[in-house]
Amino acid sequence: MATSAPPAEVTADRTSVFPRDLDWPYPNIDRGAGVRLYGVDGSEILDACGAGAMVACLGHGRRDLVEAAARQAERLSYVYYHHFTNELQEELGRRVIDVAAPEMARVRFVTGGSEANEMALRLARGYHAERGESRWRIVSPAQSYHGATLGTLALSGRRSLQHPYEPYLADHLHIAPSTGRFDETGSEALAELDRLLEALGPETIAAFVCEPVSAAALPAYSPPQRFWDGLAERRERHGFLIVFDEIVTGFGRTGSWFAYNQLPLEPDILTFGKALGAGYAPLAGMLCSAHVYEAVASGSREFEHGHTWDGAPLLCAVGLAVLEALVDEGLVERVRARGPALRDELEAAVGGHDIVGEVRGCGYLLGVELVDPRDGESFLPNDVKAAALVDATALEHGLLVTSSHSAPDGFTGDQTLIAPAYVATDEELAEMVERFAASISEVESRVKNALAASSGT
Ligand code: PLP
């Protein structure tokens, strides 16, 4: 019986899957090789964003990772962390701490970023409880994304994501930058943190959670040095924990093993995800420093939290193979060395456009902020839908990037994130920049036309 060819794009009316956006025609992807994805119709997409979620740091179709997974699946794919450990988990734990995070004492592996952040929340509260303190409030930046579970959604300050789930969400606290433009000195954010500490009492604040360099919520933005110095000083004074969400930045994305390596402070708890599984296994985790571990070790001696697939040998085998590739191929060094030039190339290619406000970032985590071309400063009106326009136009140019809204309301502040695979060659990076520049040119003229039409000129 002849079967019809699968559709190149799938719309909500042609699938049994419950899509995220019922109005978006999803390209139907068949395979990947290196930094390219291929649709079922043979169309090619240059992947400048880790398959869309900053995940595929080693590119697609890597035989070494596939073979590591296959070997382990044959030997032992799964055992439950509650009853057992396994040598793959043990070895990955040792390697992660030795190679990437020697400042940290213990690690737990989970299967996704939201799970890792949930675990961090639980441990932060548990840490204080072990010490006889009943702290529960969490403070995080208003422009942040920490996950899709209800616990992590409450942390993610963006109202567009929280709505309409507010009744389910814990009442966590969010601080500036809240004006829609970023706090250049860090003093606005610190003043807000001080106001919260004073109004609510430091004895209620369990942790400050943030991304050291933001990803989708505020692409590639990192607060200035003075903010970090001030945050470290307040931790010292008030006894809350600092939790870094390095789900995106962990394992090389910003040109160091973790983004905190480039900051003047270390977190007490750290979460990672994305790059360690590299798209070949759902693998994420949480690291904590010795004093956090000791609170449990010298207290209840139990951290009761976990998920079915935590630390499974199949997943850890992939993590070990990814870590080996990162080390053997010098990829963190490559990102560190090549990142600044890549940012300059991006800036040179798109920085002159009226709709481009800023090109920023470090390593291979780069953000392009769009502005209203009429004043070169304000955010674009919502109804222009510039973020979606960039993604769609880039796809027409055969390029995958990820755009989002970065203002605290979560509806405005169009920004695009570019996060190439660490293994991309210079030629491939140049091609990404070239296709992005062509896309931005086109978006600019479409945006200008839309603005002219709406103002009747
Ligand atoms: N934290 C950050 C900074 C993220 O970007 C994401 C996902 O994009 C998450 C947490 C949640 O990770 P996951 O989607 O794996 O649950």
Image (cartoon, helix red, strand yellow):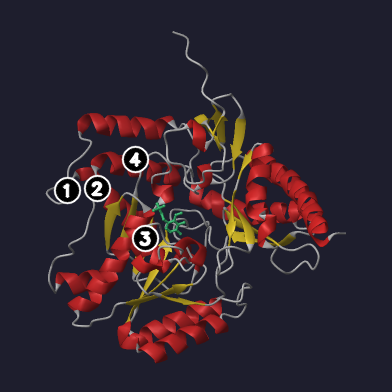
Name the residue carrying label 1: 85
Disc 4 + disc 1, Cβ < 8 Å: no
Mark 1 or 3: the one toward you: 3
Q: How busy is the neighbourhood of tag 4: few (under 14 within 10 Å), some, or many (20 plus)? A: many
Kindly identify the residue that appears in the image at 76 percent across and 54 percent down.
Answer: 447
10 Å neighbourhood of mark 2: few (<14), some, or many (≥20)?
Answer: many
Front position in the image: 72 or 26: 26
Q: Where in the figure is residue 379, as x and y percent of width and height?
A: 69, 66
Which residue is depicted at the point 61% across and 37% down?
46
- For disc 3, the marked residue is 271
Secondary structure found at label 2: helix
Cα gap from disc 1 to disc 2, whole angstroms: 7 Å
Q: Label 2 vs label 4: CA separation?
A: 11 Å
**How far is disc 3 from disc 2 in space, using C-alphas?**
17 Å
Q: Which residue in the protein does label 2 denote?
A: 89
Of the image marks 4 and 3, the number of the one nearer the N terminus = 3
Amino acid at pointer 2: Gln
Q: Secondary structure at mark 4?
A: helix
Name the secondary structure under disc 3. strand
Q: Which residue is mark 4?
A: 318
Q: Earlier in the sequence, mark 1 or mark 3?
A: 1
Asked if the residue under mark 3 is in contact with the one under mark 4, i.e. CB atoms within 8 Å, the reply is no
The relative height of residue 29 versus residue 341 in the rendered view (above or below) is above
Circle 1 — which element? Answer: loop
Residue at 33% across, 58% down: 116
Q: Is residue 203 left or right of residue 59?
A: left
